Image: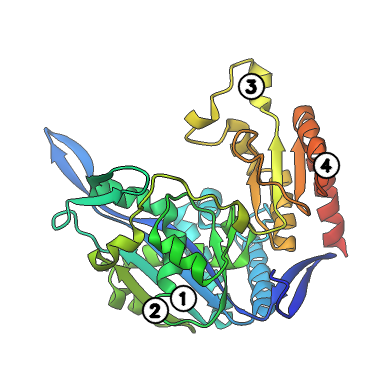
């Protein structure tokens, strides 16, 4: 991490995770949704009654001790629950995919119980903007006209950007200098982003909940907060959040964002924030040939029209090469990302690793090696490298 501070390393095999002496705070967010079943014309329909982004920041004062215990606890629980995929850390999404919701909740709860003494505090943030009182929100104005959109739509568009908005609200209370780690987000420009980068230089981790212990922990806490409130039939309120976490060994703080600070978290421009300069380095990029298209001969779907990753990428995320890539990214303290030739050509920097699957991807990766000081590995070579590091 930042070279201006005294640094330490934690060994994961022969690889090392970089540390500094700053307090570290990892941020992630999720959609907090409540709905009810209604009968319309004799048919059952699910109606949303409450929808808001929920953000979490987990503060850790001893990085080395936290990372060591978090990785160990994750591995121990994976064995206990019969999970064969040896991810370095787990996202709540992965746990739900592997175990189902019923078992995912105790897995996550036991994980937080095991490492609760390594957590100084958790910070939670959400939005209170009832559509009944605020039917519309005004956005834009910079480089284009101001426009009003329905509050329900505004809240849905707020969710993918709420990890950094939670980090901004965290600094709303006077905080000492911290190392801020944020899960990847997509956002238009907001005053909250401007304020945050004026206060610190955050590190943004693509797939942070799968390769970074701090962001993984914040993701788990967000998932558990939702689950605990639901099972105890409690509303999303600061006192209820405090109640469901009261038996754990860390402090809890909560702040909701309402209309009084709406101007801070509503976007003033339709331009998307470019996060390239804030990506956690070194990055591990996965370059993957479209193997399913080659196999069946169907045309590729234009990337801008894809709502989900290509089918093979979905399958790959459950396979050993992807697990190895997350371990490699974790050991280096960086992020991991599937590489898009149309979106990511300017993201590669000296020191990054390019992992390829397929001959076309190999050509692209090697082309970068002629321009930049990057590491180029096949997925098989990466698996062997990670395996050797684990044997040490």
| Distance (Cα) linking label 4 and label 2 | 46 Å
Disc 4 or 3, which lies upstream in sequence?
3
Q: Position of residue 67 (x, y in %)?
A: 66, 72
Q: Nearer the viewer, residue 230 or 305?
A: 305
Looking at marks 2 and 3 on the same chain, the residue that comes earlier in the sequence is marked by 2
Among numbered discs 1 and 3, the one appearing first in the sequence: 1
Q: Which residue is the site of mark 2?
A: 253
Asked if the residues shown at circle 1 and circle 3 are in contact, with their CB atoms under 8 angstroms apart, the answer is no
Q: Nearer the viewer, residue 129 or 391?
A: 129
* Quadrant of image for the N terminus: bottom right
Q: Could you say whether the residue bearing mark 4 is in a helix, strand or loop? A: helix
- The disc placed on residue 122 is 1
In the rendered image, which residue does mark 3 sit on?
293
Determine crowd level at label 4: few under 14, some 14-19, many 20+ residues with C-alpha closer than 10 A.
some
For residue 42, which numbered disc appears in the image? none
Q: Hey, which residue is sitting farthest front in the picture?
A: 143
Estimate the spatial distance between the alpha carbons at disc 4 and disc 3, rounded to whole Å: 27 Å
In screen coordinates, is 124 left or right of 141? right
């Amino acid at each position: 991490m930042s070279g201006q501070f005294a640094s330490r390393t934690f060994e994961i095999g022969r690889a090392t995770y970089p540390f500094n002496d700053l307090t570290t705070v990892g941020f992630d967010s999720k959609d907090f949704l409540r709905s009810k079943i209604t009968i319309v014309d004799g048919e059952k329909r699910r109606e949303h009654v409450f929808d808001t982004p929920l953000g979490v920041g987990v503060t850790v004062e001893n990085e080395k001790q936290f990372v060591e215990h978090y990785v160990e606890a994750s591995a121990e629980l994976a064995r206990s629950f019969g999970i064969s995929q040896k991810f370095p850390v787990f996202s709540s999404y992965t746990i739900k995919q592997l175990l189902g919701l019923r078992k995912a909740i105790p897995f996550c709860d036991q994980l937080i119980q095991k490492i609760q003494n390594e957590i100084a505090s958790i910070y939670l943030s959400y939005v209170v903007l009832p559509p009944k009182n605020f039917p519309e929100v005004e956005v834009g104005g910079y480089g284009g006209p101001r426009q009003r959109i329905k509050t329900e739509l505004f809240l849905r568009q707020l969710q993918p950007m709420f990890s950094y908005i939670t980090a901004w609200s965290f600094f709303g209370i006077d905080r000492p200098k911290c190392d801020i780690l944020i899960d990847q987000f997509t956002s238009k420009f907001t005053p909250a982003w401007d304020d945050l980068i004026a206060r610190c230089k955050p590190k943004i981790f693509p797939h942070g909940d799968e390769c970074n212990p701090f962001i993984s922990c914040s993701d788990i806490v967000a998932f558990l907060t939702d689950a605990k409130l639901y099972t105890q039939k409690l509303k999303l309120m600061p006192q209820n959040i405090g109640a469901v976490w009261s038996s754990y060994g860390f402090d809890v703080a909560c702040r909701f964002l309402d209309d009084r600070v709406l101007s801070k978290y509503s976007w003033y421009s339709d331009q998307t924030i470019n996060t390239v300069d804030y990506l956690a380095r070194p990055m591990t990029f996965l370059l993957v040939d479209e193997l399913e298209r080659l196999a069946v001969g169907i045309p590729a779907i234009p990337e801008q029209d894809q709502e989900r990753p290509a089918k093979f990428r979905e399958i790959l995320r459950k396979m050993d090469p992807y697990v190895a890539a997350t371990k490699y990214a974790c050991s280096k303290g960086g992020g991991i990302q599937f590489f898009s030739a149309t979106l990511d050509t300017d993201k590669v920097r000296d020191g990054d690793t390019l992992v390829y699957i397929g001959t076309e991807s190999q050509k692209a990766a090697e082309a970068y090696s002629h321009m930049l000081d990057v590491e180029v590995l096949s997925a098989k070579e990466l698996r062997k490298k990670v395996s050797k590091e684990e044997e040490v």
